[in-house]
Amino acid sequence: MKEAPKYRREPRPNKLSPFEEALKQALTADARRPKHERRTARALHAEIKAAGYSGGYSAITDFVRTWRQGEGQTVNVTAFVPLNFELGEAFQFDWSEEGLVVGGIYYRMQVSHLKLCASRAFWLVAYPSQGHEMLFDAL
C-alpha cells in the first residue's frame, strides 16, 4: 500500500536562526544542572534579546519544546557516588524513643542507633534519658 504524500516545507532562515546554536549550548548545559538551577525560556529569551534577537518569546518556547523532545532526550546525565567504604571510615547515627516495660512499670528509653557503612553492622544502646552523655557515650 502506498503512503500518502506529505508536504515538506524547506527550512528557511528566520529571526531565531542566528541564535539557535547559542540556545542549543545553553539547553545542553542546563540539562546537566539540577532542575532548580536551569534557565527558563523567559531567561533564555532575555539573554539572546540582549545579544540582538528581535523576535518574539513564542519562537523561543517552540524551539525549547522541540529541542527537549528531540535532542534533549539524548543528553546523558549520569552521576555516580561509590558506596564502598574502608573499615572504620564512615558510619550512620540516629536515635529514637522507645517504650519499655520492666517489672510492670513502663519506661521511656532513648536508643542510639549506629550502623557501620563498611560491614553494615548495627550497634544499639538504650539510655534512660537523652543528654550529652548519651551522645558522647554512643559515639
Image: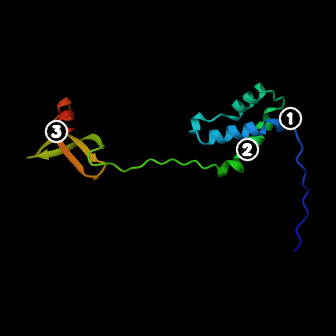
Q: CA distance from mark 1 to mark 3?
A: 72 Å
Q: Nearer the viewer, residue 41 or 99?
A: 41
Q: Which residue is mark 3?
A: 127
Mark carried by residue 98: none
Tell me the amino acid under the disc marked 3. Answer: Tyr
Q: Nearer the viewer, residue 43 or 126?
A: 43
Mark carried by residue 65: 2
Q: Is residue 139 left or right of residue 4?
A: left
Within 10 Å of the Cα at label 1, are there few (<14), some (14-19), or many (20+) other Cα atoms? few
Q: Is residue 19 above or below residue 104?
A: above
Tell me the amino acid under the disc marked 2. Answer: Arg
Secondary structure of the residue carrying numbered label 2: helix
Residue 86 placement (x, y as % from top left):
30, 48
Q: Is residue 137 left or right of residue 55?
A: left
Q: Residue at x 65, y 34 (%)?
A: 39
The quarter of the picture where the C terminus appears is: top left
Q: Of the two numbered discs 2 and 3 on the same chain, state the one appearing first in sequence.
A: 2
Q: Which residue is mark 1?
A: 15
Badges 2 and 3: C-beta atoms under 8 Å apart? no
